[in-house]
Amino acid sequence: MASRRQQPRPGAPSPQGPNPAWTDDLPAKPIKNALLPRLIMGLVLLGLWHVAAHGIKAGEVPNSFLGHPFRKTFTGNGMIDTFLAYLTRLFSLALDSPVAEQRIQLGYILCMLTPTVLIWVVEGHRRANLQAFSGRVLTFPGFWALMYQTFAIARTGPIYFLFTLLASLNPLYYRPTARVVDVDVARSVLPAVVLGYVISSVLLCLPHWSSPGAWLDLATLWQVAPVIVGPLTVLFASILRRLRSGNEDADVEVFKCKDLPHLLTAYATLFWTTAAAHLCTLAYFALSAGRLSLYRAFFDVPLPWGPLGDNWMASVDPREAFFVVLRWDQIIMVATSLAWCLWNVFEMRRLGYTTTTEALRVAAAVAASPVMVGPGAMYAGTWYWREKKIAETSKMEQGDGKKER
């Protein structure tokens, strides 16, 4: 969860910036009217949310796992225990699959979700969201993690981005002083993601055939893993804040972009990690000599306009139905992330933070990213570029930079 921020001390730079005419120094002239593009983007997100409902449905769950009964008590709270038990039973369908494509599919999806876990925690601590009423709903990353663990990322992602779209209506939302994140949070978010999400995902994907009970416990742990990343980030940040030497006010530090190198390191780490995982996955399929099917692993889903319609689950067994839902979940979220990344490229050009030539070049790279480096790297790479573009205007806002002509 986002921590409570203190108000800037007297004499600290204001979020509005000291130079009202700083837009004259931007790389390009801002585009003033964005109402129509915003409406189109909103309709795209609503359409993706609607399509996601076709494939993502609750299915049958098994009564045992490798002959081992399911745990019924986790916390002592009846409602929470029932919820965790259902998710564990449902997710157990993926653990002991004899189909190689399905095992690869599970590991790939968990890996590609990592940048989303990290970025949504960062956005939960973004100054723009903390200070604007319309952005407050984005400051609870644990809530959003609970939503996509419960209702799937394909349903949650479009709604999350819609709220961000609404928050960005604030004219100060993309100002350099609104970009900043608490420096200790910026230092803490990557370790929190690794400890809270990555390790549990790796342990879940490792086979534990001789210990089905432990495997099920790992499946339960993974259900809450994305939820605890936010609190872990706050915990680590509070420890760093106590240990930090020096007396400089944190509200002054944020205006010096001290968070930037830590955020860029986090984005770059996940970019290269997820890109490597994507390329290794493609290479593994290519070297399988036809034994493995890329289509069957990632694209074999019933279409909404197909002959079976919403009744497709009646023709497949529960395990296959679960993996179909996973594939549909990933397809919709990749499409949603692609649309959102392209929108943010447009936003940087609309604000004048980048030139038309660079925006077109980056948009082309983003469009090719799902195939070339994978959807996870696409999201992390776009946020790396976006973070730098907004931060680069900080000196211009203070009157220290000039537009290159």
Image (cartoon, rainbow, N blue to C red):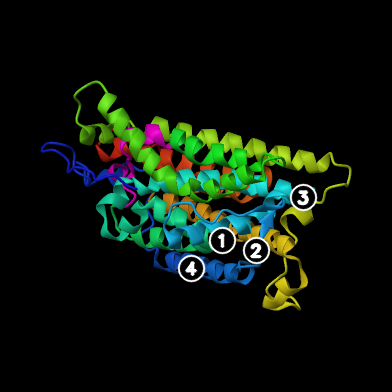
Q: Which mark is residue 86?
A: 1
Q: Secondary structure at mark 1?
A: helix
Residue 301: x and y in percent read 72, 64
Indicate the amino acid at tag 2: Val
Return the disc, 2 or 4, that comes first in the chain's sequence: 4
Q: Write the start and end of the magenta stretch as one range.
A: 173-189
Give whichever of discs 3 and 4 has the lower sequence position: 4
Going by the image, does 278 lie left or right of 182?
Answer: right
Q: Nearer the viewer, residue 342 or 235?
A: 235
- Residue 320's x, y, as percent? 74, 61
Vertical placement of 261 versus 1: above or below? above
* Disc nearer the start of the sequence (2/1): 2
Q: Which residue bears the numbered disc 4?
A: 40
- Number of the front mark, 1 or 4: 1
Residue 18: x and y, percent? Answer: 19, 41
Residue visible at 46% across and 35% down in the picture = 190
Image depth: mark 3 or mark 1 in front: 1
Q: Name the side, left or right, on which 237 lies relative to 153.
A: left
Which residue bears the numbered disc 3? Answer: 101
Q: CA distance from mark 2 to mark 1?
A: 8 Å
Q: Nearer the viewer, mark 2 or mark 4?
A: 2
Label 3 element class: helix
Secondary element at tag 4: helix
Judge left or right: residue 18 versus residue 143. Answer: left
Q: In the image shown, does 368 or 336 lie closer to the viewer?
A: 336
Are the residues tagged 2 and 1 within 8 Å (C-beta)?
A: yes
Q: Which residue is mark 2?
A: 61
